[in-house]
Image: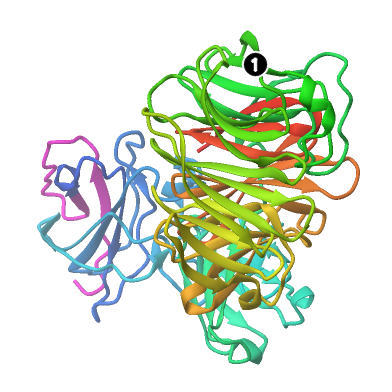
Amino acid sequence: MAHERRHIGLGLALGTVLACADEGRLFVDLDLLPEDVRLVALLPLDEGGALRSGTGLLDREFVPLEQTLELDGATRALLVGYREEFVRPLPDPERLAASPVRPSGGNDLDLPAPAWSRLGVIEDGELRSLNEVDPGRISADWVECPDGIGDGGFVMPSCLNCVSTLKQDGCRLEADLEPCSLEGLELTLGPEGAISSLRTRDPRLGTCTLHDSASALASIECDFPERAGGCSLTLLPRARPDSFEILKLADVAPSGTPYAGARHASGYLFGGAVVGPELVLATSGFSPQPWACGLEFMATESRIMYVDRDTFAVSRTATAAPCLRLPLSDLSGDGGFLATYLEGEVLRFGRFDASARSSASVPLGSFLTWSVSEAVVLSSDRAVIVLHDISEGQRSRIVFVHTGRDGLSIERDHESTAVLITGVSRISDRAVAILADASDNLRIVEPEGERAQYFFGGTCGTTNLVSAGFWMSQDERFAVGAFRENGMLLRVEPALDRCEFVRAPIHPETHDPVAIAQMGNELIVSFWARQSPRAVALGRLDLQGGHMLPAFTMVGPGVLNRLVVDGDVVYGTITDRAELVRLHPQR
C-alpha cells in the first residue's frame, strides 16, 4: 500500500453519499459542507503528517469534473472550502480547477484562511471521520497581488508636515519618505490587498508596528524616539474622484449685483439655514468687505430666497431688514428662522416668521463699532453670537441669547474679550469652544463664563489657523483646526498636549482647508485652491481613524466657506459666486 496510486472523484451531486467498491477511486460527500461554501479542494497528507499538493479549487455547483490526484498510499486528507467571493479577483473556474492547492513555500502568497476545513481518514474509497482543523498556510499558482492597490497612494505622517506617495511593484509597496527627511518604507501585499509585512529603512523611526485600518490601507505606529508621543503613518490608496453627488443652484443673488472677489468675503450670498421643507437663503444687492455692514445697508432691504429641499427650485422670495446675515434654524418650533440684521445704526439678533417678518429681537451694539462674525444655535432656547470690534481690532464679544418661544433676551454678554475669536464650535446645549487666533488659545465658554482653556497652536508648533475651519468633539477630547498653509488640518488632544498633522490626499501643496462640519463619524471639509483656477474641493475626514479618506469631489470655482449638515445631506454656499450646492456623500 505504500506506493499504491489511487484517483479522486469528487461527487458534486448534493445530498448523495457517493460510495464505490472501486479501490482506485476516492469519493467525498460534498453534502457535508455548509451551504455557503462554494469552492472546495482536497489535499492528502504524507506519512509524516505534512500536507502535499492537492486538487485545484472545484466549484461544487458548476464544474462537474473528475480530477486525478496521486494519493501514494495516503491514509488521511484535508478538505478545505471557501465561499464564492473569498478573494478578488478570481480566475475562471477552469484555471481554478487546474491549479493545485498546495502548502505555501517561503516566498508564496498565501490563500486566505478557508471558511471551512476538516481533516478526514481515507477508508474503503471514502473520506470519513472529519474533524475540524487549522490547515496552516496554503497557496496556489494563480494567487497574485491585485494591481493598483497602493500605486499612487499616500503616506500621511501624523507627526510631520509632509506627505509621500506609494509605488507598487507586484506584491511590493515602497514609500519614499524623502519629503519627510526620512528613509523609506517597504511593505508586502497579500492576495486580498491587505498589507502583510513591513520593513523600515530609517532607524530614527524606532520600533514600528503594522495595524489594520477600516478606512485606510494600513496604519503604522512608530515609537519615533525623537518625538514625544511617537508617530502614526497612515497609508491611503490613490484618491478617487466623485465621492459626492453635486446638485448646484446658480444665480441666487439679485440680478446685476456686483461680484465680490475677495477670498472668504461673504459676497452677496450670506449663508443659508434649513427651515422645515425649505432652505432659507439671505442675499443682498451689495457686496461689502467681510464682516462690516457699510452705510449703504441702512436703506437697502435684504432679499430672502426660499428653496425647496426636494426639487431644489426657488419656491418664493421675500424682502427683509437690511444687512440680514447668517440665518439659523429656529428650533423653538415656530417655523421661521433666526438671523442678525441692521435697524438704523443698531445691529440686532431677531426671530423671523415664515414670511421673513421680524417678530422679536435684541440689540447687539452699533454697526459702527461691532460686526457679526459667527452665529451658532445650541438648542431650542439658546444661541451664541460672536462680534468683532471693527474700531479696536483685536477684540471680540460672545453673546449668549435666550431664544425660547416666550421671546428673545440676552442671557449673558461676555464683553471686551481681549482676543480676536476666529473659530466657534458647539459643544453642548450650553457651551461652545472658541479659538482665539492672536494667542491660539482654545477656550470652553458657558453663559456663566470660561470653564477651560488650552494652548492649541503651541501644541502643534504653529499659530496660523483659519477662522472658518474649526471643530471640537462634544466630549472635548480633541479638536480639528485648519492650517492656513500647506493644505493641512491639525488634530489636537489638548488635555494630552498632543498634536497630529492631517493631510489631504488631493493636491496637498496647492489646496487650503477652509470649512469644517460634522456628519456622523466624519468631518466634511472644503478646500480652496490657492492658484488659478481657484476651485473648491470637498473631502471627508474619518473621526475614528483621524485621517482624510481617499475620496474627493471637485465642486467648481469659488469659495465654499459655509457648510450646513442635515442628516446625510450637506448644503454649501459658494459665497463669491452666489451659488448653493447640495452634496450627497457616496458610500
Residue 307: x %, y % from top left? 60, 15
**Residue 521 belongs to the span the image colors magenta:** no
For residue 58, above or below residue 324: below
Left or right: residue 23 versus residue 51 is left
Left or right: residue 488 versus residue 178 is left
Magenta-colored segment: predominant secondary structure: loop
- Badge 1 amino acid: Met
Name the residue located 41 percent from the left edge and 47 percent from the top edge.
97
- Write down the residue under mark 1: 305
- Give the magenta-colored segment's residue range: 1-27
Q: Nearer the viewer, residue 331 or 347?
A: 347
Name the residue located 64 percent from the left edge and 10 percent from the top edge.
317
Q: Residues within 10 Å of mark 1 (few under 14, many from 20)?
A: many
Quarter of the image with the N terminus is bottom left
Residue 93 seen in render: yes
What is the number of callouts on the image? 1
User: Disc 1 on helix, strand or loop?
Assistant: strand
**Residue 15 belongs to the span the image colors magenta:** yes
Residue 66: x %, y % from top left? 32, 44
For residue 553, above or below residue 218: above
Q: Nearer the viewer, residue 481 or 37?
A: 481
Residue 309: x %, y % from top left? 54, 18
Name the residue located 72 percent from the left edge and 47 percent from the top edge.
527
Residue 168: x %, y % from top left? 68, 63
Coloration of the structure image: rainbow
